[in-house]
Image (cartoon, rainbow, N blue to C red):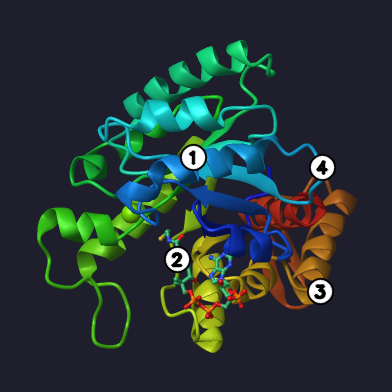
Amino acid sequence: VRLRSLLFVPGDSERKFEKARGVAADVLILDLEDAVSPPMKEKAREFVSEIVSDSRPRDWRAFVRINDLASGIARADLEAVVRPGLDGVLLPKANGAEDVQTLAGHLDALEAAHAMTAGSVKIVVVSTETPRAMFNLGSYTPAHPRLAGLTWGAEDLSAAIGATDNKEPDGTWTFPYQVARSLCLFAAAGAGVAPIDTLYADFRDSAGLERNCRLARRDGFTGRIAIHPDQVAIINAAFSPSADELALARSIVDAFAAAPELGAIGLDGKMYDIPHLRAAQRTLAAAEETP
Ligand code: COA
Ligand code: MG
């Protein structure tokens, strides 16, 4: 699955779902967790179950953010939404790979019960929402076969710690959350799954989002969470290689192909060696990937 733009949609909002399905997000994350108030949880489950089961063709993948495994209601969420049509589960407040194992066990049973292909429901983990989770980021390697990506969040982590803020006056993350973001990135890269940057809360600031996405892509993130439809096109563009980048990647790959005996080549006055070749191959592969 392509995990470039993932738009959150509160699971109890028919209106927002109608809007979201017309937006070009790779994934819609139908939320049953914190965007839904406790009295609305049951209604949200039923509504999300209907959306997932709708067999009409669609050009987006359906993920559901369930309540966390310690909430006491994660099982009920899964029982309602694991149906043919469900592409993935976003697991919040995970403490490490053991939680992936637990979730995968539930998915194994529910897929079998609903005659779904075993292993078809993928898992993306919100990997930094508890203090304990910060010490288990290495546990995602080797990756569980269902694990497709890691993302991170600062709000639940700072609330759990008791921080009074997680941003500097200029809007950048304070040091503890830069650590969380970086470790999520390394953990995802180590596990060979997609590193997905967290949301950009100021949804009216498109220029800020665009700048921020370029920094994320520079650092190695391959996609990002969206919380508002207006953010999706910006995220899709920022995490897709530009024509210039593609052209350069192609010339690097071609130059190495033309000189298989060389480990380093010169191109327009610059040196490129094997790590550059690998990066160029990744750029081309990402551009060819379909949703
Ligand atoms: N998905 C689908 N539609 C959305 C949307 C979303 N995430 N966010 C906003 N919209 C819709 C609105 O319903 C509105 O549609 P309408 O014109 O038919 O009424 C339109 O887009 C414009 O919305 P806007 O007025 O700019 O924002 P808002 O004040 O209605 O909503 C939020 C702001 C933050 C409440 C909303 O963006 C939202 O619910 N985001 C997702 C929250 C979430 O899931 N959080 C959990 C993960 S952190
Ligand atoms: Mg949260």
Q: Determine the CA span between mark 3 and mark 2.
A: 26 Å
Q: Earlier along the polypeptide chain: callout 3 or callout 1?
A: 1
| Secondary element type, mark 3 | helix
> Mark 4 or mark 2, which has the lower sequence index?
4
Q: Nearer the viewer, mark 3 or mark 1?
A: 1
Residue 113 picture quarter: top right
Q: Is residue 152 above or below residue 242?
A: above
Numbered disc in front, either 2 or 1: 1
Q: Which badge, 1 or 4, is on the more N-terminal residue? A: 1
The residue identified by callout 2 is: 199
Q: CA distance from mark 2 to mark 1?
A: 23 Å
> Residue beneath label 3, please?
243
Q: Does the numbered disc 2 mark a residue whose Cβ is under 8 Å from ligand 1?
A: yes
Kindly identify the amino acid type of the residue bearing the numbered disc 4.
Arg
Give the number of callouts: 4
Disc 2, disc 1: CB below 8 Å? no
Neighbour class for label 1 at 10 Å: few (<14), some, many (≥20)? many
Q: Which residue is mark 4?
A: 56
Query: Earlier along the polypeptide chain: callout 3 or callout 2?
Result: 2
Q: Amino acid at mark 3?
A: Ala
Residue at x 30%, y 88% (from the top left corner)? 170
